[in-house]
Amino acid sequence: MSTQTGAQVRVTPATTRASKGIRERLNGSLGTALHYGVLILFLFLTFFIFALMISLSLRRSIMIYLEFWAWPWPLYWDNYQTAMADLIPSAIRTLVVTGVSILGILIISSLAAYAFARIQFPGREVLFYLVLSVMMIPGVILLTPHFILANDLNLRGSLWGLVIFYVAGGLPFGMFLITTFFRSQPAEIFEAARIDGASEWQSLFRIALPLAFPILVTVAIMNFVGIYSDFIWPSLMLNQDQQTIMLALEQYNPVSNEFSTRPDLGKQTAGYIVATLPQLIVFSVGMKYFIKGVTSGAVKA
């Protein structure tokens, strides 16, 4: 029993349950609002940096130093012309190295993955787990032996010094993903193909690979991000006239005509955006297949 303004109010079980339900709904609403608030904050902080870069890249350097937060008007496109003229050779060189490396990773990984998934041979599982064990070795530990090996093979100063080691480094993870995907495919399809007289090569190229297109895109995108953005290995392998895009950006410090002692922030940020465009295009084109590959068997063991 409880007293309220001289009247007696009976607290029943139904009243208690109703009060508890209201408190739970309020707590749930507050929790949801807090989660969305944090996500919106992170989203704002992420896109704020990109918006600031675009704003600076469309302004003259003198205007940036005079009023940093001003609106970019009128638009100044000469920054992009200069940045593209300076960085396009390095970007093309990087894209060629990345494309050749990814092609090598996909070809070798697909062949090895099909053998691990569909061909019976002695020691198959042992070899597969040996491949998985290589994935546990941190890449930083391998820098010194890789550098010594590349030096002994006279690969320093050559783009092949990048391609060969990129392919070797991307094989374990690519073989793991593609093998698990091949094993998730119905075995009855391959048995029917063998009954109809199909060879292993025909089963691979006409059945396994077409069905595995999403996972191949997944492997390609994941390696593209690592190879295109790599800085350490190219800095060890390449000469000054063979710079990749990351090396070129690290040294890209154009001087403003208005302030000869200060860097041209407009051209610098335009260079960063130009270097980001290939990654943006790859993600825009391949994201649908990337998500499909991750969610349709890539993590099955």
Image (cartoon, grey):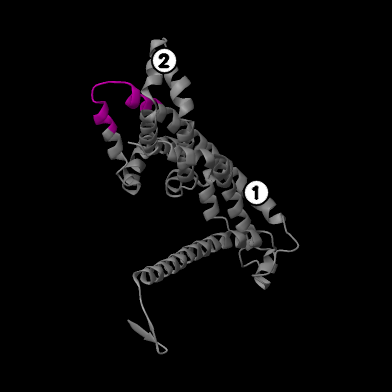
Asked if residue 41 is positioned above or below residue 95 in the image, the reply reads below
When asked about the image quadrant of residue 259, the answer is: bottom right
Side (left or right) of 19 relative to 81 = left
Residue at the image position 34 percent from the left and 38 percent from the top: 149
Distance from Cα at disc 2 to Cα at disc 1 = 51 Å
Looking at the picture, which amino acid does disc 1 mark?
Answer: Met
Looking at the image, residue 25 lies above or below residue 91: below
Q: Earlier in the sequence, mark 2 or mark 1?
A: 1
Q: Indicate the position of residue 7 as horizontal and vertical percent values.
A: 40, 86
Secondary element type, mark 2: helix
Q: Residues within 10 Å of mark 2 (few under 14, many from 20)?
A: some
Q: Which of 172/291 is in front? A: 291
Instruction: Work out which quarter of the rendered image holds the N terminus and state it.
Output: bottom left
In magenta, the rendered stretch is: 111-128
The answer to whether residue 156 is above or below residue 47 is above
Name the residue: 45% across, 41% down.
Answer: 223
Q: Is residue 125 magenta?
A: yes
Q: Is residue 160 magenta?
A: no
Instruction: Name the residue nearer the viewer: 143 or 214.
Output: 214
Point out which mark residue 84 bears.
1
- Give amino acid for label 2: Ala
Q: Nearer the viewer, residue 169 or 182?
A: 182
On the picture, is 264 further left or further right than 301? right
Pointer 2 residue = 193
x and y, in percent, of residue 2 in the image: 34, 83
- Please say whether residue 174 is visible from this viewpoint: yes
